Amino acid sequence: MTKTVSFITENFDKYDPNSIDSYLNINGFTAVRKAITTLSSGEIINIAKSATIKGRGGAAYDTGRKWGQAAAVQGDNKVVICNADEGEPCTFKDRSILSKDPFRLIEGMIIAGYTVGAQNGYIYLREEYRHLKSLIKNAIKETMEKGFLGKNILGTNFSFHIHLHSGAGAYVCGEGSTLIESIEGKSGRPRIKPPYIKECGLFQLPTLVNNVETLAAVTAFIQNGTDDYIKYGTKLSPGTKIISLAGNVNKPGTYEIPFGITLREIIYDIGGGVVDNNKLKLCQLGGASGTIGSDSILDTPYTYEDLEKVGLIVGSGGILVVDDRTRVIDFVKSIQDFFIHESCGKCTPCREGNRQIAKIIDRFVQGTSGVNDLDTAERFANIMKNCSFCGLGETAQNVLLSAIKIFPDEFKRLEAVGK
């Protein structure tokens, strides 16, 4: 099996991202032409379903199903939002698409708009990617000048406009409804559901929200066909995934891999192994909200179903490698500090749960933990998981809960020190 592939990333470093003419020279906008002039909305939805591509922002919701639901919502004015917030630590694959292939993303947004019947699209760009604003603005401008955006695209009755909106650096704005609140000029806090975004989203209009990689992937398999896409991967997890490999590895970076290769192959063959030949202590998948695993899971295939069996997730595609120079409790503390900083404070389980758990973790770090501290932290973590208002609070304690399960001896030693 090939370790890395170039399907979604096939255009990387093959054209000048500042020039639409350069993009057209490598058959750019073939997918838009094909979609708008030869395919119906239903046919595009069926293509997405046949590719069985799951949303690449972390939630893994089936894209074809999501587009079908959005298209079925009645409304003369709909919206497509590209979630380019990418605030998940150890996740930077969307940045690679934005910087190396912005026109492919724009194609995906146009196709999504045509499919669901939207007239406007918004790219929500994280504040830390502000250096990419001029690149994206130029791509939008040149696309409009060439007639692929604006009124009556390619001589059809379809009109679509794309707008760029910058976030302010809040992790919680990666959640769909929170992102929408931010675009509307409000504080970034999640909405109550229902009503759902597909029915009442941005400016109370029917809204489709997709991740950067998801939209780029749709462009790729509309252009090249789903057969070329699903020849990669496995039966239950077909296709490819762009991953962000980071931490204590020799070759960190963005890689497109076929589903089915093992974590060992990703870390040691693609990533060149652990730095200085140190022993791998743990790896975290899916960003800060993802769970962790020890070296015992290295031979697990990187698929949705196989990772789930060992308590891990694909999530955003981040893979963080941590070697044995780091204590588990210190790693847990770094994640806890992050979530305290990023919690929006709207709901009590997340706001107070994070704060109280942080105090307990600090006692473990300092060697002053009490007899019941671990049980209390675990109880609070489960309350957060089951009662928090949005995904941040529900997943903030994934690291703690998985660490307690996988490295119980580490906590027992620390408890002994505290006594």
Image (spheres, rainbow, N blue to C red):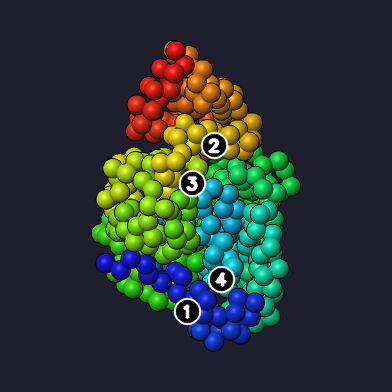
Query: Is residue 59 among what the camera can see?
Result: no
Asked if disc 3 and disc 1 are in contact, CB closer than 8 Å, the reply is: no
Q: Amino acid at mark 1?
A: Lys
Task: Mark 4 or mark 2: name the one nearer the start of the chain.
Answer: 4
Which x, y percent locates residue 331? 49, 37
Whole-angstrom CA distance, mark 3 to mark 4, is: 22 Å
Q: Quadrant of the N terminus?
A: bottom left
Q: Secondary structure at mark 2?
A: helix
Which is closer to the viewer, label 3 or label 1? 3
Labels 3 and 1: the sequence-earlier one:
1
Disc on the earlier residue, 1 or 4: 1
Cα separation, mark 4 vs mark 2, equals 31 Å
In the picture of the structure, the residue carrying the numbered disc 4 is: 100
Please, is residue 160 above or below residue 400 in the view?
A: below
* Badge 4 density bin: few <14, some 14–19, many ≥20, Cα 10 Å: many
Q: Nearer the viewer, mark 2 or mark 3?
A: 2
Which residue lies at the image location 30% right of the left edge and 62% below the top edge? 233
**What's the distance in space between the residues labelled 1 and 4, CA to CA?**
23 Å
Q: Amino acid at mark 2?
A: Ser
Q: Nearer the viewer, mark 4 or mark 2?
A: 2
Identify the mark at residue 34; answer none if there is no mark. 1
Name which of mark 2 and mark 3 comes first in the sequence.
Answer: 3
Q: CA distance from mark 1 to mark 2?
A: 48 Å
Q: Residue 334: which disc?
A: 2
Quadrant that contains the C terminus: top left
